Image: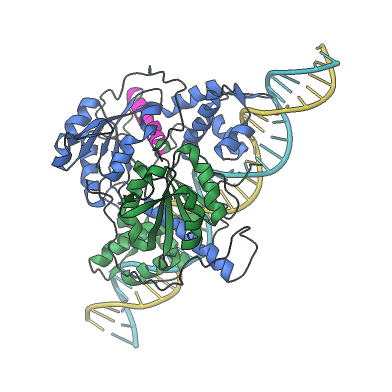
Chain colours: A blue, B green, C yellow, D cyan
Amino acid sequence: MATGRTHRPATRSRGIPEATVARLPLYLRALTALSERSVPTVSSEELAAAAGVNSAKLRKDFSYLGSYGTRGVGYDVEYLVYQISRELGLTQDWPVVIVGIGNLGAALANYGGFASRGFRVAALIDADPAMAGKPVAGIPVRHTDELEKIIEDNGVSIGVIATPAGAAQPVCDRLVAAGVTSILNFAPTVLTVPDGVDVRKVDLSIELQILAFHEQRKAGEETAAGDGAVPAATPRGTAADGSADQGPDGDVPAVMPA
Amino acid sequence: MATGRTHRPATRSRGIPEATVARLPLYLRALTALSERSVPTVSSEELAAAAGVNSAKLRKDFSYLGSYGTRGVGYDVEYLVYQISRELGLTQDWPVVIVGIGNLGAALANYGGFASRGFRVAALIDADPAMAGKPVAGIPVRHTDELEKIIEDNGVSIGVIATPAGAAQPVCDRLVAAGVTSILNFAPTVLTVPDGVDVRKVDLSIELQILAFHEQRKAGEETAAGDGAVPAATPRGTAADGSADQGPDGDVPAVMPA
DNA sequence: CCATCTTTGTGCACGCGTTCACAAAGACAT
DNA sequence: ATGTCTTTGTGAACGCGTGCACAAAGATGG
């Protein structure tokens, strides 16, 4: 019914559940830390604690990758690091482009997490001609006109959108048309993409609103019926009572001038 | 078993499922856009399309809030905006603090989405004494020493952590001790918090790795068995074959110098 | 070689979330 | 007033993810 797919149909990739895939990076991070400390093996219990998950869940997750553990001992750290890296596709190089070099785009460009783990910033792209050529994080900013050429020349298949909300869909369309099949979207908009293209979104505003919901619920329970659910919470007035009638102010705020 | 809770136990808040809460901000955004265009009513079908979800899901979501629709007509936009705002707790003011004013922290401070929708940046906090007093986004940066005082004076219950990974847990502990009960974590670490404290994490590195996994899967299917799953994807070589032995390089990369 | 002890791998049950499909409700025209 | 048409609200079925609990596997010590 909708014009295009927005969510990942995710046909259960190769038997590996989506939820498991989402946790693999977490395990990998914990394992890498262990590896740096030259720890040879870990039990599921230890690793699960480090990753902040249930140990049974961790074992089941690993079972999807194969049987890489030794009963009575645990998992070989180095071997597991390699297996997970391979499974996630981190043993190869992934060139990415960042579109929209405002505050956020610049922060992402400077983000150290890109360089490690197989990701490489192939180009920074912005619509503002004044930005063109100016180096950000040591990489010169290119103009949007060159987008298609950059994608094709570098074989980019992953794009990061950090533009204002209004520019996100057009940029997305161009990225997809040029061959990008995975998009990480920081703009507060629902992106519509054709089948076969994956979109993941990071939305600060949504996260905050979810927190506000729970925060309000806590405050409400506290005030209404003092049920022993929140252990150590000072019941100071969390905020002025609901009077701020903020009305229909501008939503879908511009993330930055890109 | 674990030292502390990391995931939301989320005892099914007040009958509203967690998954529904996570979608309410999405609906709210779409509704606000309609409101600005002075659209009086929407059908579940239209609104669902705008929010990028299934219409049945949307109707079920709204049913948890009550019966705010009119059969044969749809939903009153203004009324629904109000109801969702109220449910999410956006009719009151939420002061937030941002800890770690590096590239990302500064980007967040400049983010327009804060100001709208009831969130107000109460303070920017950084550990670097050289930053103290320097204005970012029009707000002077305060030193970490003042953290507790700031939290208490402003009645802050929501904190945003944008520090390097190593500083995140200590900062988190101090925030919680000072009274913060909701945390949005941008640092690539698992935070351990006591019961009653909500943590949501935003992790660029994890998102990219998930995309890489799917990207690799697509490339693999393409090369191995040319199944018609990816419609318009030029099968150009996505990258050099797996040779980049990136070894045990530094994980948990510093997000920014905070 | 055998006993014991640790830890994995997984069968099973349960609960949540999603989706279908349809009856009930109301608008609207005649 | 009555019939038709649109759209909501929800009962029910299904599938996925989670966590328990335990048997199998292997290490380790005597």
In the rendered image, residue A85, in percent from the top left (x then y), is placed at: 45, 26
Q: What residue appears at the point 50 percent right and 65 percent down from the top-left corner?
A: A238
Depth order, front residue of A47/A155: A47
Q: Is residue A185 left or right of residue B66?
A: left
Depth order, front residue of A15/A31: A31
Q: Which residues are magenta?
A: B207-224
Q: Is residue A106 left or right of residue A92?
A: left
Q: What residue appears at the point 44 percent right and 66 percent down from the top-left corner?
A: B87
Q: Is residue A61 above or below residue B77?
A: above
Depth order, front residue of A256/B58: A256
Q: What residue appears at the point 29 percent right and 69 percent down from the top-left corner?
A: B41
Q: Dominant secondary structure of the magenta stretch?
A: helix
Depth order, front residue of A10/B3: B3
Q: Is residue A128 magenta?
A: no
In the rendered image, residue B205, in percent from the top left (x then y), is placed at: 41, 36
Residue A53 in view, yes or no: yes
